[in-house]
Image: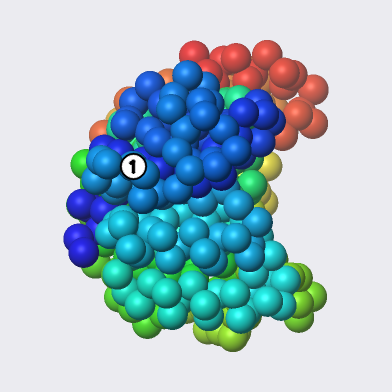
Amino acid sequence: MNITDILNPRSIAIIGASSEKNKPGNIILRNLKNHFRVYPVNPKRDEIEGLKCYKNLYEIEDNIDWAIISLPAEKSVNAIKECVERGIKLAIIVAGGFGEAGRKELESKIKESVNGSCKIIGPNTLGLLMPSKNLNTIFIPNVKYKKGDIAFVGQSGSLGVILMEGLAREGLGISFFLGLGNRLDMNENEILDFLEKDENTKIIALYLESFFNAREFFEKCRKISSKKPVILLKAGKNNEGREAIKSHTGRISKISPNLLRCIMKQNGVIEARDLEEIIDFSKALHKYKEGGGRIAIITSAGGMGVISADYISEFDELELAKFDEETIQKLSKLLPPFASCKNPVDLTANATNEMYGKALEIISECKNVDMILCLLQFHPPKINEELIDIIKE
């Protein structure tokens, strides 16, 4: 089955639909009912949220593309059998209590029932979000997100929600969100195939605790990263982290941190150490232009400039900008004679708010500069918080 076709449903059954507003089976139903043909399934109800309720999938006469299973783990196994018999393309299993809880036999039963005929997201998943299609199966209410062009795929849906809300605070939005959960079937490599071609996605961010197939993953990343940035936050880099992963998704990562870092760099993957870095990278990449890796550094502490220059040299895509003679001449007229007018620009301890502002204007007019890294130090007596507003302007 083509992944793009699978992720384009028209009719969705919600097995375990609920009339209780705080239950996943109700939240998901309300998210979807105005945008799709939605069929609540609950043998104890005749109607939920104004929609006819069905005792099982067999009662539904329409062709069903997706089933969202909001049932306990044991009952989810039986529900999957109905999905297979009804020819459903994709089932999302919300419940936990499978491999991550040591009950791998339940996952084995699902695999046996499906045998490749129905794709599975989960179990133990927060769900999927595609704003361009008004498709939202996330069962956390009132998630504050914006529609945008950043895709997130991860083994922690809750981290993804935190990321979405953090991006929204920065004016950035989501094109695609998927909590992989225990990754019984559908995995990050399949989703990368979809995101590579997805016109709504410009940046891809992932949180992974282990790789479904590491070689395949990085081969796909190498291909995609020439067109779209790929950011990876990889957890489980020490023994304590790996032990925690066992109880979260039930899988273990075996690639050493140093080897992983080399593989990521070799295949064009940007390493993030935390969610904040994913947000920072996304902000920078939104303003990045093709071939635009020439950075100017401006600071009032020479050492900070030197350290930053060293850090920039570690990235093949980045380099220190070379100022033209006109820019150097303008800076030399502005700065003290003992200041550095070349890149990195050191304003020295004599720096003032006004000096910072004028230096920024001069550097921003240089055609050899794509980005400016402003390193602030508030120790010089004539620098204060008003400098932040000057930089914004």
Q: Nearer the viewer, residue 96 or 351?
A: 96
Is 72 placed above or below 171 here? below
Residue 255 spot, x, y in % from top left: 56, 84
Is 137 placed above or below 209 here? above
Name the residue: 64% across, 47% down.
Answer: 158
Report helix, strand or loop for mark 1: loop
Q: Is residue 247 left or right of residue 215?
A: right
Residue 206 spot, x, y in % from top left: 48, 57
Name the residue: 40% across, 42% down.
Answer: 13
Residue 38 spot, x, y in % from top left: 38, 33
- Residue 188, quarter of picture: bottom left
- Residue 279, quarter of picture: top right
Is 267 placed above or below 256 here? above
- What residue did someone put label 1 on? 60
Q: Is residue 214 left or right of residue 165?
A: left
Is 105 placed above or below 316 here? below
Q: Is residue 281 visible?
A: no
Name the residue: 69% across, 65% down.
Answer: 97
